[in-house]
Image (cartoon, rainbow, N blue to C red):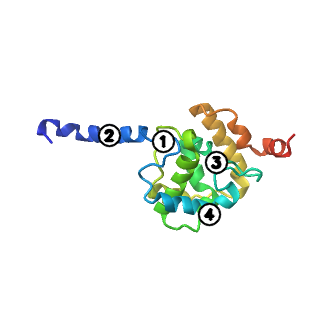
Amino acid sequence: MNRRFRPFAPLLALCLAAGAMAARQPGELPAAVTDPELARADYVENCGGCHGVQGRSAPAELPELRDRVGWFLCTPGSRAYLLRLPNVAHSRITDNQQLADLMNFVVFGLGGASAPASAVPFTAEEVARERKLALTAASLRQERAHYVDSAIRACRAPATLRQFYPGENERKRVFSGG
């Protein structure tokens, strides 16, 4: 590179990285996923039984992931929430990069267009940090309702997201059909 342009190299690298992120299509996994097939297989084995192989958990009384879960990437708190979920934080997958790949499959692959274009993939370091702060099952609905409201307010997620991720009060009404 010409010496005259060297001071601009970091800016150029940042622009190229941003361009690569913007070029990702909804449902396409980020390049940071080291083994997409393993990530999908890990999802099916560890999550698919309850959330559905395609991320559609109905009729189970669990949040659907398909085309919705990506909204949780729009704030730092909701992003951390996903990694702190008990079944994620205490996963049998002990390799943090492998778990990051699984979660990237969930939010970018299953989440599709709900993942904000500016969202960055989970990293092994982030997984290692957040899984130490696992939530308890007792706090999940309240926490989730808080982050859904944040996504609606701060990130312009559709208000209908509440019906797919209900808080405790809405849960009985939604799942009972009342």
Label 4–label 2 contact, CB within 8 A: no
Q: Is residue 178 left or right of residue 49?
A: right
Amino acid type, callout 1: Ala
Whichever of labels 1 and 3 marks the residue nearer the N terminus, that label is 3
Whichever of labels 4 and 3 marks the residue nearer the N terminus, that label is 4
* Mark number, residue 46: 4
At a point 68% along the width and 61% down the height, the residue shown is 49
Q: Pick the residue in front: 18 or 90.
A: 18
At a point 67% along the width and 55% down the height, the residue shown is 52
Q: Alpha-carbon distance for marks 1 and 3?
A: 17 Å
At a point 56% along the width and 43% down the height, the residue shown is 112
Residue 144 appears anywhere in the view = yes
At a point 68% along the width and 48% down the height, the residue shown is 64
Q: Residues within 10 Å of mark 4 (few under 14, many from 20)?
A: some
Q: Residues within 10 Å of mark 2 (few under 14, many from 20)?
A: few
Label 2–label 3 contact, CB within 8 A: no
Q: Pick the residue in front: 68 or 147.
A: 68
Q: Is residue 19 left or right of residue 57?
A: left
Q: Give the position of the N terminus as an image quadrant.
A: top left
Residue 132 appears anywhere in the view = no
Amino acid type, callout 3: Leu
Q: Alpha-carbon distance for marks 4 and 1?
A: 24 Å
